[in-house]
Amino acid sequence: MAHNHDHDHDHDHSELSEIELRVRALETLLTEKGYVDPPALDELIETYETKIGPKNGAQVVARAWSDPAYLERLRADATAAIAEFGFTGRQGEHMIVVENTANTHNMVVCTLCSCYPWTVLGLPPVWYKSAPYRSRAVRDPRGVLQEFGVSLPETKDIRVWDSTAEIRYLVIPERPSGTDGWSEEQLAELVTRDSMIGTGLALQPSQLEAAK
């Protein structure tokens, strides 16, 4: 059958991946059937792109590093203290913070599925949801950390926390040295998503400079 090109789309030159094309086709089908409201979908995407994500968690960590009174409120009731920033809602109702120290490193996993604190970290990365990470994080956390490029001394304990539908964890990484006098905005730039899961460390000031 001859293909009619009296239309203006350019599917022959699409740069979308196969999975992206499948998602696009599914979205189109659901929209045509009335199961998806496009404006609502756009609002949802805009929310996760601009309002929810690791930048929220980085603000919480930076405040905890620089304000002892705030850190105490986090320890006492993390959900309420995080809500002081306006970070509330789904997947952030029951938060607990765990603090890295010179002697202890904390790491978060969800062994059953992918429970994750969306309000402060956004959507979970693919590896967080993968079966290998979920199974190995509890059996060989030190080995998993090395694969993330994090080598810890044998003298440092590693504690693994299993997220559930009821409890979500946020790791407060150790504050890098050489940051005395830094503002919260500057400190937040050192806080990565992985450092708040425990599969990474906060950036050193030299690393931040090199990245600019």
Image (tube, grey):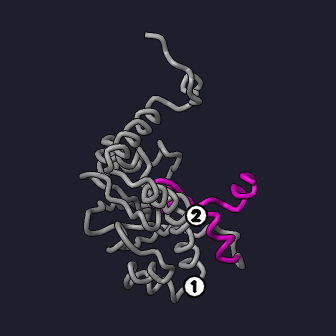
User: Element under label 2?
Assistant: loop
Q: Quadrant of residue 188?
A: bottom right
Relative horizontal placement of residue 172, taking residue 138 as reference (left or right): right
User: Element under label 1?
Assistant: loop
Residue 3, percent from left and from top = 49, 15
Residue nearest the observer in this picture, 158 or 127: 127
Residue 7, percent from left and from top = 56, 27
For the point 45% across and 71% down, the residue is 99
Identify which amino acid the numbered label 2 is placed on: Val
For the point 65% across and 64% down, the residue is 189
Q: Which residues are magenta?
A: 183-212
For the point 45% across and 33% down, the residue is 21
Q: Which residue is mark 1?
A: 67
Mark toward the start of the polypeptide (1 vs 2): 1
In the image, residue 191 lies in the stretch drawn in magenta: yes
Q: Is residue 187 above or below residue 144?
A: below
Mark 2 Cα within 10 Å, few/some/many (few <14, many 20+)?
Answer: many
Q: Is residue 90 visible?
A: yes
Q: CA distance from mark 1 to mark 2?
A: 16 Å
Relative horizontal placement of residue 205, taking residue 4 as reference (left or right): right
Q: Which residue is mark 2?
A: 191
Q: Is residue 155 visible?
A: no
Residue nearest the observer in this picture, 84 or 43: 43
In the image, residue 117 lies in the stretch drawn in magenta: no
Mark 1 Cα within 10 Å, few/some/many (few <14, many 20+)?
Answer: few
Q: Is residue 151 above or below residue 100?
A: above
Please identify the quadrant where the N terminus is shown: top left
Q: Is residue 151 above or below residue 177?
A: above
Identify which amino acid the numbered label 1 is placed on: Asp
